[in-house]
Image (cartoon, rainbow, N blue to C red):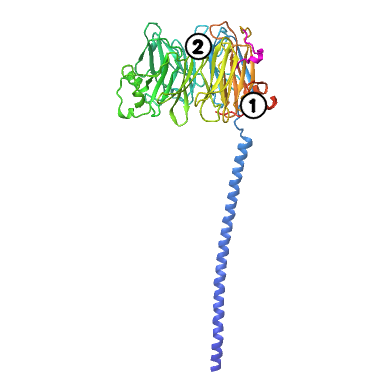
Amino acid sequence: MTENKDSEGEILPLKNDETRSQDTNEVSNRHKETKIKKFTKFGQLSRWRTAAFFIVLFLCLIVVFAFSFIIPCPVRPVSQRAWNRTFENAVSYPFFTLWDMNRDKVSDVIFAWKSSNNTIINGSCAAEGLPFPCAYVTALSGTNGSLLWQRALAEDVQHVQCGIENLSDAKSSGCLIIGTPYLLSAISSSGDTLWMLNASFVVNLSVIGPALILPDLDGDGVGDFLIFFIPNQVSSVSKLILRLLSGKSGDPIGQEVYHNVTENFGSLSPLVHITNTGAYYILFIEGTVQGVALKDIYLQATGMSLTADKLNTDVLRSDSEWEKKTDPTSKMIQVHNSRTAKYLQAVHVQGKNAGRLLISTEDRVELLDGQNLQTQWLHNISQMQGAPVSGYFNADDVFDFLIEDFIEKNRKKVTIVDGKNGKILWEEDLICSKNCPKPSSINTVSQTAFLFWGELPIQVNGSVPEDLTENRHYLYMVHPSHPYIILELKNTTENVLSFTTALFERSRHACNVLLLGQPVGSRQGPLTVIKQKLKEAISLSTVRRLNKGHDVFSDAEIKEYFYRIRYSN
């Protein structure tokens, strides 16, 4: 029995171990089944996620291919290298302006002219109910010269100012047209009338332009204008009349502001000047160069007292330094005391609101500090032919100036002076009559190319003809990288009424624009507007070498260098 018990005792533990092993195996099997079920569900979920990912990727690829191949991209306008547009039996006003009117990122050409041709359909005198003949303002596409729009006007045109942002609360830019005697009209970029000045506000007055664009004065969220008028009746002591106009409606802001004029003034050359403290002043030429605070104009026009918050705004702020120079009775500031001032120009200086003021008189060009009005330098001349043109001839960030000086009959001197000290950087004598077209400039990546008209004496064997029987104009280009070389870009016997060089597309290509024909008041004839890509003109140009220095490069290398020049804003 004992042995059996012992045997039994020995056998039972073995049975217990087997039982435990079986139990463990059963539990393990159950865990495995659970894990297999979990893994199966996870695998199914993973497959769904993978499928969803590839579906999304497939849809994205479809969208990409649709935009790339199925849906056409906007077609960028291709600007023609050159185009011209001719109007028969016409005379032109001697100016034009450039602005992108149709929003294709290419500048368009806007100019004013008159014609005896009454068969014009678009915007004709008859269509506008105007007596014949009348004036036209026309916009031509910068890409190909096609007609964008045309407006007939009842009066002669003095100025066309385009690129005025948010004019009449419009989202796009527009133009302001100033005519004689009192035409003042705002038009949209499509040529539609936004507003016109009510003639009842300017009875017996004549407007003289251009208009000055001001910040918002009447609180309607749209910038306003300052317009100058003179009485139609001439007297020994006449008045210059200043009027604030709403840019939104064209209605006057307050009353007329009067300024006594004791002598005739030719070019008004008005400009808005901001001092270093942010105060706004209006400068203009009346023999001498004078200025008046915008704050004082606003007070006289509206009769309103200024509250503390208005006085602290930029528009109606005072400058203590300029207030000391202001006459307490007339409220005028003597900016420059020469009585022969002809041109007044603002010169931007990086980091300074006031910048500089360039004043050209009959016999000198003078640069003033825009804050303290002290003379920086002056350059003596014989007879000023036109307003100086700014650019960078030195490798620095200070503007230099091209000056044309009419030194004697049929001869002028073209001089580029250093903007820092007024010293001569480059000069050349040219043969040219008094009706020679005005110069221009175009910025390159680091400097400036200057373009001017005339005729090199070497082309007529160094002699100056007594009378220029042939009305031939040569267009030259000079760049500081090759100062002893000038390119002859064009020569023409046609009358050049207006000319400029500008970028038609931002950082893409520079173009020459010419207005050829007869001025208003002359016998009518063909009027031609020409646009030519500057690179095209360079490729067709002639290299002219000056006798003042030596350049080792060949003509082909010079033209290749000029052709590869990149232009910027």
Looking at the image, which is closer to me, 212 or 255?
212
Looking at the image, which is closer to me, 329 or 540?
329
Instruction: Kindly tell me whether residue 106 is visible in this rendering.
Output: no
- Residue 148 lies within the magenta run: no
Instruction: Using a 10 Å C-alpha cutoff, classify the residue at mark 2 as few (fewer than 14 neighbours), some (14 to 19) or many (20 or more).
Output: few
Q: Do tag 2 and tag 1 residues touch (Cβ < 8 Å)?
A: no
Residue drawn 55% across and 65% down? 34
Q: On the rendered structure, is 520 left or right of 208? A: right
Helix, strand or loop at label 1? It is: helix
As drawn, 225 above or below 114: below
Where is residue 175 shown, x and y percent of the image?
Answer: 48, 20
Looking at the image, which is closer to me, 251 or 317?
317
Where is residue 401 shown, x and y percent of the image?
Answer: 52, 22
As drawn, 490 above or below 43: above
- Residue 455 lies within the magenta run: yes
Quarter containing the C terminus = top right
Instruction: Using a 10 Å C-alpha cutoff, classify the residue at mark 1 as few (fewer than 14 neighbours), some (14 to 19) or many (20 or more).
Output: many
Answer with the quarter of the image where residue 518 lies: top right
Q: On the rendered structure, is 371 left or right of 503? A: left
Could you tell me the amino acid type at mark 1?
A: Phe
Answer with the quarter of the image where residue 476 lies: top right
Circle nearer the viewer, 2 or 1? 1
Q: On the rendered structure, is 43 left or right of 192? A: right
CA distance for labels 2 and 1: 48 Å
Q: Name the residue under label 1.
A: 562
Counting residues from the start of the chain, the first of labels 2 and 1 encountered is: 2
Residue drawn 54% across and 85% down? 12
Where is residue 463 shown, x and y percent of the image?
Answer: 64, 11
The magenta region covers: 453-465
Q: Name the residue under label 2.
A: 128
Quarter containing the N terminus = bottom right
Looking at the image, which is closer to me, 15 or 138?
138
